Image (cartoon, rainbow, N blue to C red):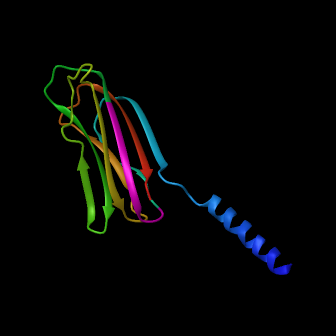
């Protein structure tokens, strides 16, 4: 009888522990910016407490176009075992884009080191249009 009770207790503990485990993918950070008319300097969005596999999704929309030939280029930065890395969303989004070409959706998957920030930014040589930017970071494992 004691053996059955002990075995039953271990099964219950195992089931409880399994239900407390994290499931992936999991959104760990988000930012939504509107009315942007300037470049965004490299900005931390998340610092993973442990090394892991991450996916960043960027969505950029030109809300007020201009007639210039420049483009906005969003990018992400992270650190892995090879050091500091950067990946721009190429090609960027033209500042004169109008619907349906007025948006850019981009994703990138990478392994990031523990305690090192995942960052985003937006480059442009001369800001003339207005845009919105949404950034989502998911931990995949």
Q: Which of 81 and 68 is in front in this view?
A: 81
Point out residue 121 in the picture as x, y percentages from the top left corner. Answer: 31, 44
Q: Does the magenta stretch include residue 58?
A: yes
Asked if residue 71 lies in the magenta stretch, the reply is no
| Residue at the extreme left | 69
Q: In which quarter of the image is residue 101?
A: top left
Instruction: State which quadrant residue 6 falls in.
Output: bottom right
Q: Is residue 132 among the parts visible in the rendering? A: yes
Please, is residue 14 above or below residue 76 in the view? below
Which residue lies at the image location 42% right of the left edge and 48% below the top edge?
Answer: 137
Count the marks: 0
Identify which residue, 35 or 101, lies in the foreground: 101
Q: Residue at x 43, y 64 (%)?
A: 115
Report the residue at 82% width, 74% height from top. Answer: 5
Dominant SS type (magenta): strand
Which quadrant does the C terminus fall into? bottom left
Residue at the farthest right position: 1
Q: Is residue 42 visible?
A: no
Residue 129: x and y in percent read: 26, 25
> Is 98 displayed left or right of 135 in the figure?
left
- Residue 126, percent across and down? 19, 32
Position of the N terminus, as image quadrant, is bottom right
Residue 55: image location, x then y, percent: 37, 50
Q: Give the range drawn in magenta.
A: 49-60
Instruction: Report the side of 103 relative to 92 (left or right).
Output: right
Left-right relation of 95 to 34 = left
């Amino acid at each position: 009888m004691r053996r059955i009770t002990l075995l039953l207790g271990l099964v219950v503990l195992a089931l409880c522990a399994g239900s407390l485990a994290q499931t992936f993918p999991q959104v760990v950070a988000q930012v939504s910016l509107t009315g942007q008319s300037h470049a965004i300097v490299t900005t931390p969005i998340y610092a993973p407490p442990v090394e892991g596999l991450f996916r960043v999704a960027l969505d950029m929309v030109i809300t007020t176009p201009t007639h210039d030939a420049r483009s906005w280029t969003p990018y992400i930065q992270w650190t892995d075992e090879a050091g500091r890395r950067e990946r721009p969303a190429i090609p960027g989004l033209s500042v004169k884009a109008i619907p349906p070409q007025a948006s850019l959706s981009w994703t990138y998957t990478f392994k990031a080191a523990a305690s090192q920030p995942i960052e985003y930014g937006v480059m442009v040589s001369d800001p003339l249009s207005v845009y919105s930017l949404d950034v989502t970071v998911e931990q995949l494992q």
